Amino acid sequence: GAVVSQHPSWVICKSGTSVKIECRSLDFQATTMFWYRQFPKQSLMLMATSNEGSKATYEQGVEKDKFLINHASLTLSTLTVTSAHPEDSSFYICSARRQGPGELFFGEGSRLTVL
Amino acid sequence: DAKTTQPNSMESNEEEPVHLPCNHSTISGTDYIHWYRQLPSQGPEYVIHGLTSNVNNRMASLAIAEDRKSSTLILHRATLRDAAVYYCILRDGRLGNEKLTFGTGTRLTIIP
């Protein structure tokens, strides 16, 4: 089946630094990718829709200047958490849709811890 | 997106069938019913989806009520590896409405 890979799987950073998380579709092209955030014991919350070659669409309440999304190719989207603070510590998950079938494929997730 | 309602948690004995219910009384004609599951510290995994007819695949079966206001995910023979949070999600099938909105899901515990 199709595979979506995220890197890094976990990262620890100091408060005030920026962290980049990559999401790759390994065996298919994805014109659209989605970024989610999940806090402990809570459900996934959609942050933004990443569109190849155009600006991302952010959900209400998500700061676009805080969470920078770039979808430069059909197989790669990146999420950069700028000036990270402890409250940004979370599990970040991306997903991608292959053309045609309705199934969305999810990455393994990236756990961010901000000290 | 139309909302779904699921029990917060369920338990089942190993090697027995499991029926996970989902109510979606406000479903629209273009909404597909999707099921995903999430194991601890992993991203969600696709299980099954359907529109009107019952569906079967190697992982599970999906039974959809005739009025489409409810559905049931059926795991025919639960194993310990099936312990996860199961999400029932409605997804608009019209082009451009592709995002998935997750509810709270059902936490399934398998008893050895």
Image (tube, coloured by chain):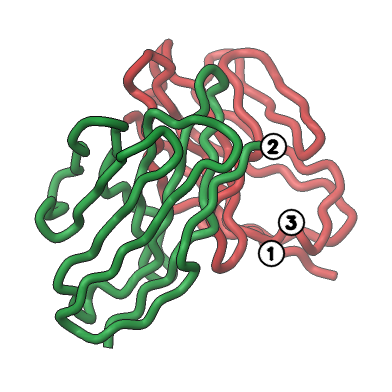
**Residue at the disc numbered 2:** A1
Q: Nearer the viewer, residue A92 or A40?
A: A92
Q: Do discs 3 and 2 share a chain?
A: no
Circle 1 or circle 3, nearest the eye: 3
Residue denoted by label 3? B82
Compute the Cα span from label 3 to label 2: 19 Å
Rendered colour, chain A = green
Q: Residue at x 29, y 32 (%)?
A: A51
Same subunit: marks 1 and 3: yes
Instruction: Give the residue type that dot 3 points to.
Output: Asp
Name the residue nearer the viewer: B22 or B56.
Answer: B56
Closer to the chain start, of discs 1 and 3, is 3
Q: Quadrant of the N terminus of chain A?
A: top right
| Chain B representation colour | red
Quarter of the rendering containing residue A67: bottom left
Image quadrant in which you'd find residue A60:
top left
Mark 1 is on which residue type? Thr
Which disc number belongs to residue B98?
none
Q: Residue B45: give x, y in percent of width and height.
A: 60, 47
Secondary structure of residue under mark 2: loop
**Is there any visible trace of residue B42 in the rendered image?**
yes
Q: Position of residue B57 (x, y in %)?
A: 78, 30
Both marks 1 and 2 on one chain: no
- Residue at the disc numbered 1: B109
Using the image, name the chain to which the residue with label 1 belongs. Answer: B
Protein chain holding label 3: B
